[in-house]
Image (cartoon, rainbow, N blue to C red):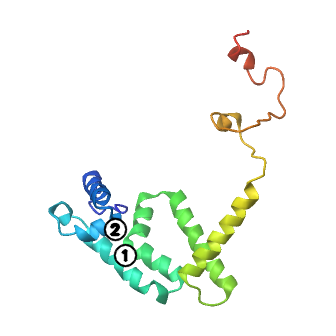
Amino acid sequence: INTPRRNIGKKRIQFIKDKAEAEDLTYLDVLRKYIDEPILSRTKAKQFLNLIDKYRENYREMSVSELLQNLLQESGYDAYLREDGDQDRIDNVSELFNSIVAYEQSVGEETTLEEYLQAITLYTDYEKAEERDCVKLMTIHTAKGLQFPYVFLGGCRHGVIPISRALGKT
């Protein structure tokens, strides 16, 4: 909600969370209900809600790539990323856009957001199913503290892993 900055800091977010919990509402519903409260008056929360409402009404009329592109521009997130200079995030958004364009091209016709999300969900579910019975390769440092029933150390030589110091032997 505050990326890019909309003057909705910790106090205002806490207000939204507290109201949501107390009234059993979503954060978005709380924002709608309390948008004219003094605590939210000097923010860009109303613009944020208007953006959400605009795309909730119109997203079916756009291609998924067009939707993403418009949302990035109108929300200010694209400009925010470029100003921030976070190349990893820029690359991630670019990869998402490329994925959408590739999907649209593979389908060969207009596709809806629901169809794209369903295809991606099926793809990631398939990946998860493939990962269940597998071997994970990682460094000892990465594995430390994780719960695995078996851990194999391959290619260890005497003295490479200083286990003797851990056992109190020198």
Q: Amino acid at mark 2?
A: Leu
Which residue shows up at 35% across the image and 65% down it?
A: 26
Which residue shows up at 83% across the image and 21% down it?
A: 158
Q: Amino acid at mark 1?
A: Ile
* In the foreground, 167 or 101: 167
Q: Secondary structure at mark 1?
A: helix
N-terminal-most mark, 1 or 2 = 2
Q: Mark 1 near mark 2, Cβ–Cβ under 8 Å?
A: yes
Pointer 1 residue:
52
**Residue placed furthest toward the top:** 170
Pointer 2 residue:
28
Which residue shows up at 28% across the image and 54% down it?
A: 18
Q: Nearer the viewer, mark 1 or mark 2?
A: 2
Q: CA distance from mark 1 to mark 2?
A: 10 Å
User: Where is residue 94 drawn, in percent x and y?
Assistant: 56, 69
User: Does the image show residue 42?
Assistant: no
